[in-house]
Structures are given as structure tokens and as C-alpha cells.
Image (cartoon, rainbow, N blue to C red):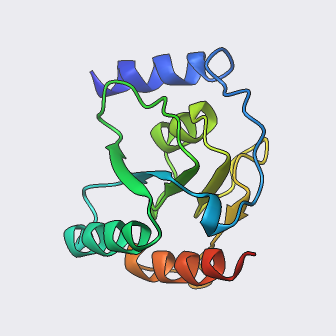
Amino acid sequence: MKLMRKLIRRLCLRSHRSRTATGVIPLSEVFSVVVFTDDSEAGLEPLKVAIKSFFARNGAVVRYIRADDEDLRTTSDVFIALNSVPSIDERYAAVCSGARFKIGRHQFPGQIYDLVVTDHGEEPAPASEAFALIQKLITSIQ
């Protein structure tokens, strides 16, 4: 079933592509956030709580989606993908997201993300470290 879902998502990338103009927006304009996560990564629950509390302090609502969700097409102000390994599900969710500001850890063909936080070592950094850097960067945007 997973293989069929991945094949269908790959075929539907172009037709489901979001037409929303994207770009860097300040935290004061963020009211809704969608976070794409890989649940197989360890230590994700404390990170989810930290993400939710960070954006709640700024008045934004956070929603989490995973690769096995039925519909990955979402609308929000910010889309964040915290996967340490890129996948077709992450690419589909990012391309189809109607978010005005897209943040990820891997750039895909077509320059999907407005902000990319990459790993510099051979081993991928934990998602918590990636989010700490994302948090620092988006807080500094005026």
C-alpha cells in the first residue's frame, strides 16, 4: 500500500501544486503552522510540545501531519518539515501546501522551501537541533 501511495503522490505532484505565492514572513504575521514530522525519529514528543508552546506564545495554532495521513494538502501561514531524511511524502506535502512561508531541511527540485536548514556533518542532526536553529532564525525576521 505504501508503494502505491508514493507512486500516486509522485504522479499528482504537478496537478496538486499550490499556487500560493511564498516568501519569508515575520513571526507577527504567523497565525497557523503545519509541521510535517517523521514519527520514526526518536525524541519527537518533547519537540512537539516545544514547537507548540513556541508558536502559542506568538498566538499561532500548530497542526502536525505525518507521511501516512490521507491528505497532505494543507493551508497555513507556515509549513515546517523536520524530517532528517527527504522523502516523496515530504516533497508532496511541501509542494501542495498553501503555506505562505515554507521551511525545510532539504531543498527539492523547483526550490520549494523559502528557508532551508541543512546538516553539516555526515550524520543528520536531531530534529530538535534543527528546530532550535529555525526558531532562532524566524525570531530574528522583522
Q: Nearer the viewer, residue 23 or 60?
A: 60
Residue 69, compared with residue 90, is above or below; it is above
Q: Residue 83, percent across and down? A: 44, 59
Report the label total: 0
- The answer to whether 76 appears left or right of 118 in the picture is left
Foreground residue among 127 and 87? 127
Q: Residue at x 48, y 83 (%)?
A: 132
- Tell me: residue 82, above or below residue 67: below
- Give the residue at x 69% y 55%: 107
Residue 41 appears in the picture as rendered: yes
Q: Quadrant of residue 59?
A: bottom left
Residue 129 as seen in the image, left or right of residue 134: left
Q: Where does residue 129 sit, x and y in percent of width and height?
A: 45, 83
- Residue 74, given in percent of the width and then of the height, sits at 48, 33
| Percent x, y of residue 126 | 39, 78
Q: Residue at x 56, y 24 (%)?
A: 10
In the displayed structure, 125 sits above or below 3; it is below
137 on left or right of 33 = right
**At 75% from the left edge and 75% from the top edge, which residue is drawn?**
142
The image quadrant of residue 95 is top right
Q: Nearer the viewer, residue 21 or 81?
A: 21
Q: Quadrant of the N terminus?
A: top left
Say if residue 123 shows up in the picture: no
